[in-house]
């Protein structure tokens, strides 16, 4: 059994290609991965599942990444967050909370940087 097999990561992005890319990378390193196509689906999964890390896009339909992060904090879900978005769409102030909501990575994500960041947070 690999050391990371018990660590569950939720990847949230409206692009199936991005979800598949991140899933492939993280599974290669032994992580369990769940996916959601928007913040509403992600919040439901976070409330019912046992995830250790959240990787989310910002610009998504139904519930964007900022609203997802606000809801995660409002629900008292204590989970590290990695935001993966374009440089232009990310603004800490839009999260509506007093502290930086997580680590920001720019799309397209460098696989080595993603894995090293996940390792550091977990």
Image: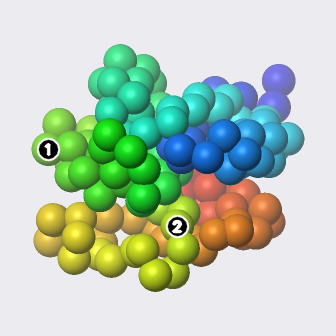
User: What is the residue that sits farthest to the top in this orientation?
Assistant: 48
Quarter of the figure with the N terminus: top right
Look at the picture and state if 7 lies above or below 83.
above
Distance CA(mark 1)–CA(mark 2)? 22 Å
Residue at x 70% of width, y 66% of height: 109
Q: Which is more N-terminal, label 2 or label 1?
A: 1
Is residue 80 shown above or below 19? below
Q: Where is residue 55 shown, x and y percent of the image?
A: 52, 50
Q: Left or right of 48: which side holds 105?
A: right
Q: Which of the pair 22/8 is nearer the observer?
A: 22
Residue drawn at (78%, 62%), measured in percent from left and top? 111
Residue 87 horizontal side relative to residue 1, left or right: left
The residue beneath circle 2 is 85
- Crowd band around label 1 with a 10 angstrom C-alpha radius: few (<14), some (14–19), many (20+): few
**122 left or right of 91 in image:** right
Marking on residue 74: 1
Residue that appears at 48% across and 62% down:
83
- Residue 102 x/y as whole percent: 39, 65
Q: Is mark 2 on a helix, strand or loop?
A: strand
Choose between 16 and 69: the one closer to the eye. Answer: 16
């Amino acid at each position: 059994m690999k050391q990371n097999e018990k660590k569950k990561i939720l990847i949230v992005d409206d692009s199936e290609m991005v979800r598949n890319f991140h899933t492939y990378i993280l599974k290669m390193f032994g992580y369990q991965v769940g996916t959601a196509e928007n913040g509403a689906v992600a919040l439901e999964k976070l409330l019912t599942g046992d995830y250790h890390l959240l990787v989310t896009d910002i610009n998504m339909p139904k519930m964007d990444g900022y609203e997802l992060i606000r809801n995660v904090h409002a629900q008292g879900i204590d989970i590290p967050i990695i935001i993966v978005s374009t440089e232009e769409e990310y603004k800490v102030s839009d999260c509506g909370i007093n502290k930086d909501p997580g680590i920001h990575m720019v799309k397209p994500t460098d696989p080595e940087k993603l894995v090293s960041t996940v390792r550091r947070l977990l």
